[in-house]
Amino acid sequence: MNARRRALVAGLSALRFVFALSAARAQSPAAPASEPTAGAVVSVGVYMPSVYFPDSLSRARYAETLARGLENTLGHPVRGRAFGAAGEFQAQVAAGGVDFAAVDAAYALQHGGFEPLAQAQSGGNPARPLIVFTGGAAGSVSALAGQPIVLFDVGASEDRFLSNFVFQGQIGPDYFKRAKPVRDAQAALSVVQLGKARITLGYEGSGGGLSPVFTSRAAPLPVFVRVRAVEPAVAAAVKKAIVGLAAPTEAYDGFGPYNGGGSALTALRSALGSPPGGATTEPVLASPAGNLPPPASHLDPAIPPALVQEPPAADAIFLPPAPADAF
């Protein structure tokens, strides 16, 4: 009798997470053996090179904090894993070591196999401006032409991200001198603080004492995604748990619903799909304010050419105000 009782208790423990899911999961088809099921530990990764963390330990602690927040809502163990390099993260995804993850929006857009479930938000906004910082005296973007710039890891789309999205096609990929690539925002900031590069890029509020030079349009904050196949009930439960979860960093304060058609994500998607340095805005064509006076003096041989006074063309040109989103 005791043996049967122990077996019953063990069986009930294994089904604990099943009872924590919504009733709709009971109608879901059984998941393949290779997929995480309701009784398996859920693994959540963190790969966000654009978000500043003081060190690797801080990033690891954040991954655990995110996991604990999900665990408290799900009532089931969740494992947090932090990654500082794209290769490490990709290797674990390929090996089945990560089920869900918080990743940079640019990274998510370049990996179509990921299913977006939620997006980080700052004050209810899923986007936040990026700032061009310099280690020297604050100046202008034109004054920094040819200076070395170092960025957090954006992947193969770095040229498109910088010239097309941040500067909206108004500079080419060779406008700045590229410093040796680094892994994340913390490393990029340190390189500039040490004087090994002049310029870097980060979310608003993450300059670490550097001088802001330029503010970009709002850039999408990280996205929480499903990175591999899981039982539908598990995915639904995790999605419900992550939306509204408070999990603050220096860039955002938590996660909210994902809107793939949002303006910031749409702009980034377009920028990453265009040739580097290609203009992403249409040129503004200005009409003359009025008709230029006829140059009758050119036809009068009695007037010496040296005495001809042409009206300044600039007086007849009217420039309309720039669009709100123009560079």
Image: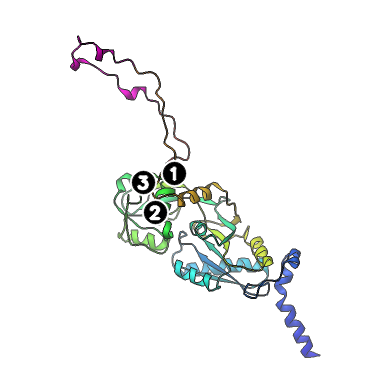
| Residue placed under numbered mark 1 in the picture | 280
Label 1 sits on a secondary structure element that is loop
**Quadrant occupied by the C terminus:** top left
Tell me which label, 2 or 1, sits earlier in the chain. Answer: 2
| Rendered residue at 32%/44% (across/down) | 142
Residue 164 in the figure: left or right of residue 247: left
How much space separates mark 3 and mark 1, taking CA atoms?
A: 11 Å
Q: Are marks 2 and 3 in contact (CB under 8 Å)?
A: no
Q: Identify the residue shown where x is 65% and y is 68%.
A: 72
Judge whether residue 156 is colored magenta.
Answer: no
Query: How far apart, in angstroms, are the residues tagged by discs 2 and 1?
Result: 14 Å
Mark 1 or mark 3, which is nearer the start of the sequence? 3
On whether residue 303 falls in the magenta region, the answer is yes
Residue tagged 3: 171
Q: Nearer the viewer, residue 85 or 63?
A: 85
Q: Are marks 2 and 1 in contact (CB under 8 Å)?
A: no
**Element assignment for label 2:** helix
Q: How is the image coloured?
A: rainbow
As drawn, which residue projects farthest toward the top?
302
Q: Quadrant of residue 63?
A: bottom right
Percent across and percent down for residue 153 are 42, 61
Q: Going by the image, does 244 lie left or right of 183?
A: right
